[in-house]
Image (tube, rainbow, N blue to C red):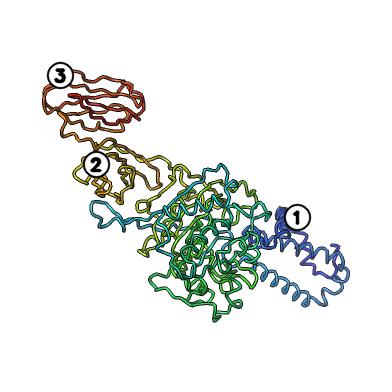
Amino acid sequence: MYNPLPYLPNKFIKIIENLKKRRIHSKIIFFTLGILSTIWFLIRVVPKPSRAAYPCMQATAPYMAGFVLWLTSIFSSSLFLVSFRRNLNKNRWTYALIFLVLFGFGIIINIAITPGQDIFAKSNNYTKAIWNNTQRVDGLNGGMTNDFDEVAIIKSDKELASEIDIDDIEVMVRQAIELSGGISNIVSNGDYVVLKPNLVALPPTPTPEYVQISGIATDWRVTKAVAKIVRELNPDGKIYIIESSAASSTREILNYYNYTLENIPEVDQIVALEDSCGAFEDYSDDNLKTLLLDDIIRLYPDEQKPNLSPEFYINKIYDNADVVISIPVLKNHKLTIITGGVKNVAIGTTPPNIYGMSETFFGKWTKIDHSWENINKWIHDYYLLKPVDFVVIDGLQGFDHGPTGDDELTMEEMQHNMRLIIAGKNALSVDGVCGNIMSLDPSFANYMVYLDNEDYGVGTIDSRFIRIYGEKIADIREVFPHNTEIVNQAIYYDYTPPEMEVSFPEIVDNSITFNIESNDDLNKLELEVNGVLIDQICVSDFSSVTFEVDELLLPIDNVKLIGSDIFYNETSVSFEHLGIEEVSFAATLQQNYPNPFTQSTNISFTLKKSGIVHLFVSDMNGKMVSNIVDKNLAAGNYKYNWGNNASSGTYILTLEIEGKRISKQMIKL
């Protein structure tokens, strides 16, 4: 046999000949993957080096590295083939050592860009936390509570988010803050207040058009409006804005989004957190404070922390604040499902010198394990170190594929034109509402379940214990998709309100009672009396419900009973003209039952003495549509069935006797 490489052993030549006879599919696959990975790297990473840490780049890096090394070896072989032939046998151990060095160097590079996480993690590794949603109901008297969180949703009447100007934003922020209880009992003069926006990164294309109302970052004008309100209450105190980016220079990101003292003169200082945390991995820096959580509270494993201990490190600028206001944006998140007031500080205020990836790259996914399980445990722990005092959500635009977007989509394709400001005192409750606005079930966000399962006083995701003022979720809700399955699993499409039939209310003094028939979707009942929601919510035992009405709302004239399911889908039943003194009448007219009705309804009245009775139904314009009774009747109880042939709509039922009338409203669905 002719040996083309006389310096190679014949046994090795036989192996080569056998390989030539085999199919070459593996070579084709290797070559294809290698060249595609290399092209992808050149297109994606060269224009923006920070993309090297993206999961897609981490996945393709091994193929690219192998392909480049292979090309390099081919090129080197073509140049030095003759020399290699002569020296291979003589210096084979030297070449073996060089190969091992290159191989080890490749492994080090691969580890550096795949920092301690499974880059191929899928949602089947995700375990949904068990939500204990019974703890607040246990022990309630009659299923009634007056202990609930208030969240306000304000929507602009402008058609486009881009049309909302700085004055409009201030009005919206003021309305949302006041409607959710205000901050006058939170902020006092002389306080040290920290405002924490969400400026995680630059947009994929950082052009001037995305500085405001981008959806990816908190609009500086929203933060300015909050700062202005705080300064009015706190003229002599300190107000700081703090932020830490997820990538490179926070100051660069602050400047891009117009976070300057010139634009926001109400604040004393705008802090890029990496400038106030000391040297990289310096645990003893004076800017840091060491905090601990009890063992029974702490969830994140100590062995995953950079210091391998129970200790957490927090920046003193944040920890020393008397008041913290979180100002995130309305968007979803590829790992934690919902971005909001909790996550904004539980990741965004971690000191970059301790939890950042390097001295210049402040992403937290090396030092804080971003696996499905541990990232949620981290947020639970770190948030409890310093819970926020108030939340204002920038929902002007709304953004999906968070936190930084999908490079395959344009910014406009990820924006939602929501035109909202959301506010509330308890961050967890506000975040739960925001999840529902995005059609995301908060019980799929493990960190939210962890925080809700214990009585930490930070809010709840249980919609029974949250009252919403302003816009109704059913009127503004949209689906916020993502390219991660875990987010899409949390999306719900249940927009059907609960079914319920309500009897005519029984009123005794300031108590009003309803008998109700409903399906299992009914989750809570609220009562509006004379146009005002009373400070009670019924969260269980819906068959017979009694509300106590404040004396300031008496006499009871008009009431609306509002039933909703876990996703804030609502059904309401109204009763009007309840304040008419019927005792002086010669008759009493009961509310028709059921009401609303789909086929027919029962009408009942009682005559105290005989007389000419006129019972009729008219439409909302006063036109009579049905004459039920018009004759002399003896004293007694009477019952009629009506509505089989009636069209859907609202009707007025009227009983007339001795020149006096009693009316009730009827609704046919």
Crowding around mark 1 (Cα neighbors within 10 Å: few <14, some 14 to 19, many 20+) is few
The answer to whether any part of residue 122 appears in the image is: yes
Residue under label 3, please give it: 632
Measured in 3D between alpha carbons, the distance from the residue under mark 1 to the one under mark 2, in whole angstroms, is 86 Å
**The furthest residue to the top:** 631
The three-letter code of the residue at mark 3 reads Asn
Q: Amino acid at mark 2?
A: Phe
Judge the density around disc 2: few (<14), some (14-19), many (≥20) Cα neighbours within 10 Å: some
Q: Nearer the viewer, mark 1 or mark 2?
A: 2
Where is residue 82 shown, x and y percent of the image?
Answer: 88, 69
Q: Is residue 266 above or below residue 574?
A: below
Check disc 3: other Cα within 10 Å, few if <14, some if 14-19, many if 20+.
few
Q: Which mark is residue 211?
A: none
Sequence-first disc among 1 and 3: 1
Q: Earlier in the sequence, mark 3 or mark 2?
A: 2
Q: Which residue is mark 1?
A: 21
Residue sitting at x 26%, y 22%: 616
Of residue 486 and residue 550, the one placed in the foreground of this image is 550
Q: Amino acid at mark 1?
A: Lys
Q: Which mark is residue 514?
A: 2
Tell me the mark number nearer the camera, choosing from 1 and 3: 3
